[in-house]
Image (cartoon, rainbow, N blue to C red):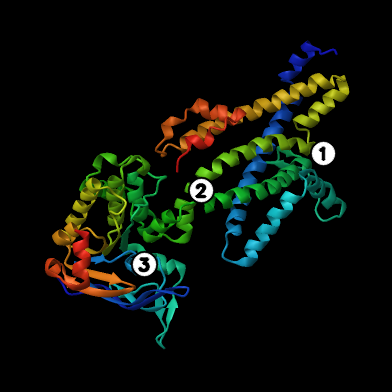
């Protein structure tokens, strides 16, 4: 086996505009899709707990569908399928008349967001249900209306349960963006494929790609640890879990999670 | 003491499914009066207390707080119609409640707990709410704990904080649902002291509690419930000489 180390290292931290642009696209796609997914998921989670049965059922069907269909299929249906059926065709757009947002990128944002919403909806529902009934009663006793209660007490408290899986979702999202290659978005995966076709250095390039994904998700894990540490500042036992411990948990998972958490 | 009624309960009935837990409660509490509610567990005192701010609905009867019907609207033909969720919420603003397990919002500091209601519900300005909150914390002996999170406080401190939170809403009546049952004797004393001060300052209070010391020092009346009905209603100073069921019950407490 020949592994061209020189080639590997020059491409590992490839600072060419093409590669950097691809990385930027990957991160941007992940952030936009995740953000949209969170917003949609919040509504979905609230809908799942609605008093009105039709709303509850519609949300349940959405969640079921999104979890039942592969994300590749969603992307193809959304981008190629809808266009072929002449229902909707994504077109290139220009932001402020300057920045080109390609049709494929738009479709990828939407496709990954509606996929994400399905998962986030369940995470929000679970989080909202985890809120202690007595905290809600205390809010009621202060005369809070439902919307105020949701905004000021229920959602912030549910966040403790929501944030960790939400962070994991973003980790997955960073990797799932590679699927956008199938609808022609020149993100990291597709760009690497193109280089490989040009240079035939498939192994070096894809090992480099793997390292790059690992780098992105690891940086995110550190950020996630900092966020979680900040959010648990009110815990009676906050001091017992160090930031380093949290980071280690996120990177390799030590199973010490439950032990450190008290209600 | 004025004779204006702060709370009037008339023939209040409540069922949980087939279970008849309140069987016609009649109770009038005058403004400034302190009523202690006692009775064995399961007698319905907690449930009754929770119907006053409509945390529990009722199926029959009327409850008025400051002459306003709680939770319902009376139709011309005398039937009760539930108020909207928002109208019920608005009606609770001036009915303070203190819970057995404190229930301070754990994601907020003590100070934030105290300004939350005034700012978000009453529309008080933040500056004014903060200033008042500091005053209230001072009053319950927690001036130095303003920035502490509830979970880092002792039970007694949390309960005093919860009382301050209720007071921040400038309630016209305060309901205490077994406020010291979750506390040890020492912290119970510090909470009772705060409650006694309130009582002596003229706050209208209904207190579900078996603390006989509090009854003797601060209560005007003692009301005993059993099996969902009120079986005794005595001036607090007669409790020492009471006989019958309430006398037995009280002697067992002491």
With respect to residue B253, does A230 lie above or below? above
Mark 1 = which residue?
A: A182
Determine the chain carrying the residue at label 1.
A
Q: Identify the element where label 3 is drawn.
A: helix
Task: Please determine if labels 2 and 1 lie on a single subunit.
Answer: yes
Foreground pick, B208 / A230? B208
**Residue B54 pos. (x, y %):** 38, 68
Q: Residues within 10 Å of mark 2 (few under 14, many from 20)?
A: many
**Residue B84 pos. (x, y %):** 46, 71
Task: Please state if A52 lies on the left or on the right of A82 as rendered.
Answer: left
Using the numbered discs, state the Cα–Cα distance from disc 3 to disc 1 in whole angstroms.
61 Å
Q: Is residue B31 visible?
A: no
Q: Is residue A175 visible?
A: yes
Q: Identify the disc placed on residue B47.
A: 3
Task: Please state if A62 lies on the left or on the right of B241 as rendered.
Answer: right
**Residue A232 pos. (x, y %):** 45, 38
Between circles 2 and 1, the one closer to the viewer is 2
Mark 2 = which residue?
A: A158
Whether pointer 2 and pointer 1 mark residues with C-beta atoms closer than 8 Å, the reply is no
Determine the chain carrying the residue at label 2.
A
């Amino acid at each position: 086996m020949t592994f061209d180390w020189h080639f590997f290292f020059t491409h590992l931290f490839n600072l060419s505009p093409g590669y950097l642009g691809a990385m930027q696209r990957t991160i941007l796609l992940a952030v936009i899709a995740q953000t949209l997914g969170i917003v949609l998921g919040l509504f979905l989670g609230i809908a799942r707990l609605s008093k009105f049965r039709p709303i509850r059922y519609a949300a349940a069907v959405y969640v079921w569908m999104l979890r039942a269909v592969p994300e590749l299929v969603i992307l193809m249906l959304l981008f190629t399928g809808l266009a072929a059926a002449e229902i909707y065709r994504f077109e290139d757009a220009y932001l402020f008349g300057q920045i080109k947002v390609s049709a494929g990128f738009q479709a990828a944002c939407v496709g990954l967001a509606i996929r994400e919403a399905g998962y986030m909806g369940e995470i929000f529902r679970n989080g909202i249900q985890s809120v202690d009934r007595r905290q809600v009663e205390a809010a009621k006793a202060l005369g809070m209306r439902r919307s105020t209660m949701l905004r000021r007490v229920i959602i912030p408290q549910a966040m403790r349960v929501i944030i960790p899986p939400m962070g994991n979702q973003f980790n997955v999202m960073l990797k799932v963006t590679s699927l956008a290659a199938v609808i022609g978005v020149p993100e990291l995966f597709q760009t690497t494929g193109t280089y490989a076709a040009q240079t035939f250095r498939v192994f070096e390039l894809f090992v480099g790609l793997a390292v790059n994904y690992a780098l992105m998700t690891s940086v995110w894990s550190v950020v996630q640890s900092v966020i979680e540490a900040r959010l648990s500042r009110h815990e009676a036992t906050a001091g017992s879990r160090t930031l380093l411990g949290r980071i280690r948990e996120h990177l390799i998972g030590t199973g010490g999670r439950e032990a450190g958490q008290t209600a | 003491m004025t004779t204006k009624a702060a709370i009037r309960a008339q023939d209040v009935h409540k069922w949980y499914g087939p279970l008849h837990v309140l069987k016609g409660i009649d109770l009038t509490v005058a403004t400034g009066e302190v009523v202690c509610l006692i009775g064995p567990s399961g007698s319905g005192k907690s449930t009754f207390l929770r119907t006053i701010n409509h945390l529990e609905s009722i199926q029959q009867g009327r409850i008025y707080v400051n002459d306003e019907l709680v939770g319902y609207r009376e139709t011309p033909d005398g039937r009760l119609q539930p108020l909207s969720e928002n109208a019920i919420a608005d009606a609770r603003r001036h009915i303070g409640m203190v819970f057995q397990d404190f229930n301070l919002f754990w994601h907020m500091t003590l100070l934030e707990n105290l300004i939350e209601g005034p700012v978000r519900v009453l529309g008080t300005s933040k500056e004014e709410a903060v200033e008042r909150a500091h005053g209230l914390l001072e009053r319950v002996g927690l001036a130095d704990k303003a920035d502490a999170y509830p979970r880092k406080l002792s039970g007694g401190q949390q309960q005093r904080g919860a009382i301050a939170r209720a007071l921040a809403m400038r309630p016209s009546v305060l309901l205490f649902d077994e406020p010291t049952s979750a506390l040890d004797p020492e912290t119970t004393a510090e909470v009772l002291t705060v409650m006694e001060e309130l009582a002596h300052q003229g706050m209208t209070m209904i207190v579900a509690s078996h603390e006989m010391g509090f009854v003797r020092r601060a209560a005007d009346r003692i009301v005993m419930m059993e099996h969902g009905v009120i079986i005794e209603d005595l001036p607090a100073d007669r409790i020492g000489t009471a006989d019958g069921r309430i006398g037995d019950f009280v002697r067992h407490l002491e």
